[in-house]
Image (spheres, grey):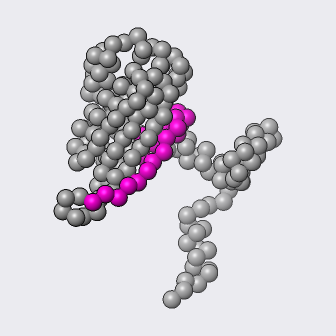
Amino acid sequence: MSIPRQKIREEKSKENKSTAIRIKTTVLNELKQEAEQKMEDVNTLVNQILISHIQWHKLAKKSRLVYISKDLMAKTIDHLSDEQIVQMTCEFSKQRFMDIIHMLREENTFACFMDTLCLWLDASGFHYRIETNDICSNNDNDDTIKIYKIYFDMGRKWSLFFKTLMALAFEYHKTTYAEVKMTDNAVILKIKCDY
């Protein structure tokens, strides 16, 4: 049974609304240039910008998050010992980290946490990719593992900070299977997809 075209148009119009806004010519020219570089249309780019503002930037400001130079953060954390980094991360996690997550998302679920992590990585300009692997467990049920490969390029001590923070987040959310590994410039998360 096919759905009539009119019904499809009505359903699509419920998802998207059209509006007219005035944009300075210089800003519009910048948007057009960026859209062309990304090989997408201006409408798609403007929607991405608006979504990014609503889902991240507006809430990040309310959560007391600020932009800071990656180089400065890497140099600062390099002055700490491994023990100091772990201690600082534990204190931050207990005192502030989960409060920040609560401010950024309405729900306190592991899925919301991982979504927020990806928003932060995107907003911060960190390169990452997500792979999905199907594995077979002992009882012959197929399980799916998501692997997040995050390239920070900020040195071993930043990787240690982030690895520790993620281990604490996994513990907080009582994740059934999660593993965190690090290299000098990257962190790899392996998570069973039961969220």
Q: Relative to 7, is 108 above or below?
A: above
Q: Work out whether 10 lies above or below 15.
A: below
Residue at screen point 27% across, 33% down: 168
State which region is magenta.
Answer: 115-136
Res. 47 visible in picture: yes
Q: Which quadrant of the structure image shows residue 98?
A: top left
* 17 or 45, nearer to the observer: 45
Give how far across and how far down residue 99 sits, in percent. 33, 33
- Front residue (pair 149, 35): 149
Q: Is residue 24 left or right of residue 102?
A: right
| Percent coordinates x, y for residue 106 in the rendering | 37, 46
Q: Nearer the viewer, residue 128 or 10?
A: 128
Q: Quadrant of residue 41?
A: bottom right
Left or right, residue 131 beside residue 142: right
Magenta run includes residue 118: yes
Residue shown at 55% from the left, 41% from the top: 53
Q: Is residue 39 depicted above or below 29 in this figure?
A: below
Residue 10 covered by magenta stretch: no
Residue pictured at 29% horizontal, 21% vertical:
86
**Residue 107 at least partly seen:** no
Question: Residue 35: percent from the left, percent from the top?
Answer: 71, 47
Q: Position of residue 31 (x, y in %)?
A: 73, 43
Instruction: Using residue 23 as the reference point, say whether residue 6 is left or right of it.
Output: left
